[in-house]
Image (cartoon, rainbow, N blue to C red):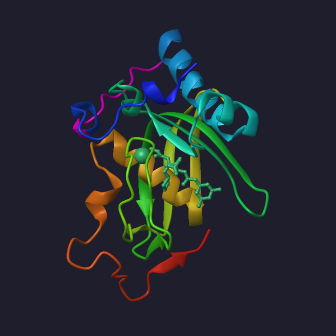
């Protein structure tokens, strides 16, 4: 079981590396790790387990955050409208994106960052993403907008050594370009 102590924090060099592609087909070990990552998210969203083990309620996790420099991400998110996004992906890749930007009005945090970093993180408003889905055992193509698009971009960034605060404007952290879509969640 993955616990908070297994999650590396900012300052650890693995968070700044470019993660390695996973050789296909994935090994049983890679599949086991990715399932553990998805299980961490499920546990962290369970009120009893999160309290018992002191877990921050996570919506996404990338393998480098558990010190494994491989291109694997888990996302577990329920939208207000009840739509569920539960994906465990290998070698995810954005194949197209909108020019239009969006951002969370509350800013972003990170399971690997134990402090508040205020400011808007501008991301693509809409993305199309491909990746090998270990649950469905096939390549999937996802068209995303809103909060799910934000979460997948945050996790993809971890595979490229990018932290959310790299995107915050130093001089004017709450500057939103004209036309960018605010997300209130
Ligand atoms: C998170 N959770 O899991 F707007 F229902 C964050 C933490 C760091 C606060 C635990 C989160 O944003 N939950 C959330 C937000 C909502 C509505 C809701 C739940 N991450 C994942 C992470 O660090 N992955 O590497 C940070 C998110 C910030 C934006 C996308 C991911
Ligand atoms: Zn993060």
**Chief secondary structure of the magenta portion:** loop
Looking at the image, which residue sits at the far top? 28
Looking at the image, which residue sits at the far right? 82
Residue 150 percent coordinates (x, y): 50, 59
Q: Which residues are magenta?
A: 16-25
Judge whether residue 19 is colored magenta: yes
Task: Out of 138 and 147, give the one closest to the viewer.
Answer: 147
Q: Is residue 17 left or right of residue 98?
A: left
Residue 1 percent coordinates (x, y): 58, 18
Task: Out of 83 and 47, give the one closest to the viewer.
Answer: 47
Identify the residue at image location x=50%, y=69%.
106
Judge whether residue 115 is colored magenta: no
Identify the residue at image location x=37%, y=46%.
113
Task: Out of 10 and 147, give the one closest to the viewer.
Answer: 10
Residue 100 percent coordinates (x, y): 43, 77
- The quarter of the image holding the C terminus is bottom right
Q: Quarter of the image holding residue 74?
A: top right
Q: Quarter of the image holding residue 14?
A: top left
Looking at the image, which residue sits at the far bottom? 178
| Above or below, comparing residue 13 to residue 129 in the picture | above
């Amino acid at each position: 079981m993955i616990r908070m102590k297994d999650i590396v924090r900012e300052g650890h060099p693995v968070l700044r590396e470019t993660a390695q592609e996973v050789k296909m087909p994935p090994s049983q070990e890679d599949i086991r790790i990715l399932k553990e990552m998805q299980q961490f998210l499920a546990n962290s969203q369970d009120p009893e387990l999160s309290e018992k083990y002191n877990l921050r309620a996570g919506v996404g996790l990338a393998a480098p955050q558990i010190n494994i420099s491989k291109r694997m991400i888990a996302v577990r998110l329920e939208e207000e409208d009840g739509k569920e996004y539960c994906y465990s992906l290998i070698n995810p890749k954005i194949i197209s994106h909108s020019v239009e930007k969006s951002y969370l009005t509350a800013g972003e945090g990170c399971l690997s960052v134990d402090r508040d970093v205020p400011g808007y993180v501008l991301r693509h408003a809409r993305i199309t993403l491909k990746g090998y889905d270990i649950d469905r055992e096939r390549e999937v193509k996802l068209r995303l907008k809103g909060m799910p698009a934000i979460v997948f971009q945050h996790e993809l960034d971890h595979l490229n050594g990018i932290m959310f605060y790299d995107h915050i404007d130093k001089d004017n952290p709450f500057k939103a370009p004209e036309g960018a879509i605010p997300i209130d969640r």
